[in-house]
Image (tube, grey):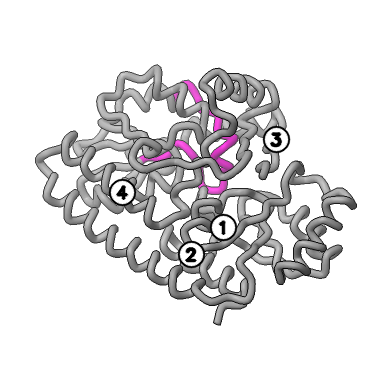
C-alpha cells in the first residue's frame, strides 16, 4: 500500500519554520532551552520520542521537542536556531527516516549522545510504504537511495503504534540515559520498568479486546498502522495514491465498496492532524461510518487522550467498535 503523499505549500513551510524559532523553549517541560539547565537536557524529534524521554527521565531531564503540537511531523523544517541549540543538548532522541530535516541536522551535530529509536527495535516492510518528505524531488532521491542499497521499499517507521516494539525502544532509551547520566541510572531504570508495565497493560488490553471480532479489516487514509495490525491479527487498507485534499476516484470507491462488503468493513478512519475530507467522501459514497484512529504523531486539544496511553486506549475502543468486538 502507498501512503498518500503529503504536500504543504511554501507558505506553510515558511510559517512552520518561523514558528519553529520558538519551539525549543515553548515546548520545553520547564520552558528552558536545551543546554541551558542543570538537568540532563534531551531534544526529542516528535511526540512519541518526547513521551519516552519524559517518562524515563522523570525529574532528572529537561525535554524539548522539535515538532510543535499539531504540526505534521513528516513535514517538519528546522530553523537555524533549532539546529544550533540541538548541538547544546546532552542527548537527542529521534527516529531515523521519519523526518529527513532532523536526520540531516543530527548528522551535522556534535551532540554526544544520539539515540536513534530505529536501531532499538526491528523495523519492517509493510508493503510499498512511501513518504513524501517535502516534495516529489526528495521522494525520488530517497527512492534512488533505497534502490542503490538494494531495498525495494522503505521500512515502515510507525513502530511506536505497536506497544511491544515501543517498549523495546523504551528499554534502549533507558540504557542510553543510564550510560550518559550515570548519577541517575537507578531512577532511569525504575522509571523504565514502570513504563514497561504501562505498555504491557496496553498490549494485554489490545490482545483481549481484538481477539474476537466480526471483521479483521479496517480502512484508513494513512498507512500508519501496519505494526499494530500485524501485532493483533488485523489488516489495514489505506486509501492509497491520494492527496489528503483530493477525492477518491470512482474506480477506487468501487474497489473499496466491494472490499467493505466482502470483509464486513463498517468504518473509514481518519486522523487528527490531516483533513478528514477524503475519508468522509469515501464513507458517504460507500455507506460507511467515519471515526478517528490517531497515529499519535502529536498531541493536540483534538486528541482523544492526554498522552500516549490515553490515545492508544481511545484507538482500541474505536477499533473494537468498528470491527465488532465480542
Q: Earlier in the sequence, mark 4 or mark 1?
A: 4
Magenta range is 64-81
Q: CA distance from mark 4 to mark 2?
A: 20 Å
Q: Is residue 206 above or below residue 147?
A: below
Q: Which mark is residue 7?
A: 3
Q: CA distance from mark 4 to mark 3?
A: 31 Å
Residue 225 locus on image (x, y percent): 55, 53
- The residue pinned by badge 1 equals 294
Which residue is drawn at the image coordinates 74% and 70% (left, top)? Answer: 289
Q: Earlier in the sequence, mark 3 or mark 1?
A: 3
Instruction: Identify the image quadrant of residue 294.
Output: bottom right
Q: CA distance from mark 3 to mark 2?
A: 27 Å
Secondary structure at numbered mark 3 = loop
- The residue pinned by badge 4 equals 170
Judge whether residue 25 can be spotted in this image: no
> In this rendering, would 130 be left or right of 22?
right
Residue 12 locus on image (x, y percent): 67, 34
Q: Earlier in the sequence, mark 3 or mark 2?
A: 3
Closest to the observer, 195 or 128: 128
Amino acid at each position: 500500500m502507498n501512503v498518500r503523499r503529503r504536500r504543504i505549500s511554501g507558505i506553510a513551510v515558511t510559517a512552520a519554520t518561523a514558528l519553529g524559532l520558538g519551539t525549543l523553549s515553548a515546548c520545553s517541560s520547564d520552558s528552558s532551552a536545551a543546554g541551558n539547565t542543570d538537568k540532563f537536557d534531551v531534544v526529542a524529534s516528535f511526540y512519541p520520542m518526547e513521551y519516552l524521554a519524559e517518562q524515563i527521565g522523570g525529574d532528572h531531564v529537561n525535554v524539548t521537542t522539535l515538532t510543535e503540537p499539531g504540526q505534521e511531523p513528516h513535514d517538519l523544517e528546522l530553523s537555524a536556531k533549532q539546529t544550533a541549540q540541538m548541538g547544546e543538548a546532552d542527548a537527542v532522541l529521534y527516529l531515523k527516516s521519519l523526518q529527513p530535516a532532523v536526520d540531516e541536522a543530527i548528522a551535522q551535530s556534535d551532540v554526544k549522545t544520539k539515540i536513534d529509536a530505529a536501531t532499538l527495535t526491528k523495523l519492517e516492510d509493510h508493503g510499498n510504504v512511501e513518504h513524501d518528505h517535502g516534495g516529489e524531488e526528495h521522494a525520488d532521491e530517497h527512492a534512488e537511495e533505497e534502490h542503490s542499497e538494494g531495498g525495494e521499499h522503505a521500512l515502515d517507521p510507525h513502530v511506536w503504534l505497536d506497544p511491544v516494539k515501543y517498549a523495546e525502544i523504551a528499554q534502549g532509551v533507558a540504557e542510553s540515559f543510564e550510560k550518559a547520566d550515570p548519577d541517575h541510572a537507578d531512577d532511569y531504570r525504575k522509571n523504565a520498568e514502570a513504563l514497561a508495565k504501562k505498555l504491557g497493560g496496553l498490549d494485554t488490553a489490545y490482545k483481549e479486546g481484538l481477539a474476537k471480532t466480526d471483521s479483521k479489516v479496517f480502512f484508513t487514509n494513512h498507512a500508519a498502522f501496519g505494526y499494530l495490525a500485524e501485532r493483533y491479527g488485523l489488516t489495514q487498507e489505506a486509501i492509497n495514491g491520494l492527496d489528503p485534499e483530493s477525492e477518491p476516484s470512482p474506480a477506487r470507491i468501487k474497489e473499496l465498496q466491494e472490499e467493505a462488503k466482502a470483509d464486513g468493513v463498517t468504518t473509514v478512519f481518519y486522523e487528527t492532524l490531516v483533513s478528514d475530507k477524503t475519508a468522509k467522501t469515501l464513507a458517504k459514497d460507500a455507506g460507511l461510518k467515519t471515526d478517528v484512529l490517531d497515529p499519535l504523531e502529536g498531541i493536540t486539544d483534538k486528541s482523544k487522550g492526554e498522552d500516549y496511553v490515553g490515545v492508544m486506549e481511545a484507538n482500541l475502543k474505536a477499533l473494537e467498535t468498528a470491527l465488532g468486538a465480542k
